[in-house]
Amino acid sequence: MLLLYGCRNGGEHPFTRRLRELADLLPGLDLVTAFSAPRAQDRCPQDYDYAGRLDLSAIDPLLPQRPLVYLCGSPDFATSMTARLVERGMPRFDVFAEAFASPPIVPQTLKPQTVHVVGTDKSFIWSPELGTLLDAAQAAGLSLPSGCRVGQCESCAMRIVKGDVAQLGGDDGATDQCLTCQTVPLSELTLAL
Ligand code: FES
């Protein structure tokens, strides 16, 4: 297993000790760390393996074995890395990404709204301090489907039976459905799975 880890320097290097422990414990784990802007006190090779951006040529010897790639990082990082991996010959569907994104900011000036969920006998009152529809439903004891909570897996999509919403992650143009992890109600609302 090859773990390519890129960050700016030793001051922004989460899980440093844990990764070293794992590399010692797992002989099959090859840990390669790149610092894009190492500080004077960062030591090579003790703290990092090389300066600069992640060098993806490290995966080339593995390509004949048809490896799977798992990416973690910002949405831009995931997009650019996926493109670079595909350029190197990886099938797009062998690349999996978990993007870190900021939670949506809920405008606190919105008015509370009643939300009904078809197929349940529950309604709940949404208000801005509760967060998104998904957060408010969970606070009311209603478990709605969700996966990533950052607007990417779409497992939280629900049909809008009645009412108006605002999609905080950007409007995708759909008027009859919403991602509850990114959405707040603008009127009394009825949702269905
Ligand atoms: S939970 Fe993944 S998009 Fe909403």
Image (spheres, rainbow, N blue to C red):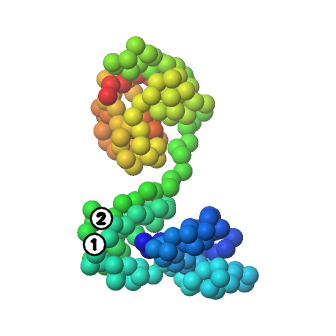
Viewer-side residue, 133 vs 63: 63
Quick check: marks 1 and 2 in contact, CB under 8 Å?
yes
- Is residue 4 visible in the rendered image? The answer is no
Q: Nearer the viewer, mark 1 or mark 2?
A: 1
Q: Which mark is residue 48?
A: none
Image height check: is 26 above or below 112? below
Q: Which residue is at a point 34% across and 19% down the rendered structure image? A: 118
Where is residue 78, by image quadrant? bottom left
Q: Residue furthest top?
A: 121
Residue to which mark 1 is pinned:
66
Viewer-side residue, 82 vs 14: 14
Which residue type carries mark 1?
A: Arg
Which residue type carries mark 2?
A: Asp
Percent x, y of residue 80: 40, 69
Where is residue 119, by image quadrant? top left
Task: Give the alpha-carbon distance from disc 1 to disc 2, as whole Å.
Answer: 8 Å
Q: Which residue is at a point 45% across and 66% down the rendered structure image? A: 77
Left or right: where 179 falls relative to 89: right
Residue to which mark 2 is pinned:
94
Q: Which residue is at a point 38% across and 37% down the rendered structure image? A: 156
Of the two numbered discs 1 and 2 on the same chain, state the one appearing first in sequence.
1
Figure label count: 2
Where is residue 157, by image quadrant? top left
Circle 1 crowding by C-alpha within 10 Å: few under 14, some 14–19, many from 20: few
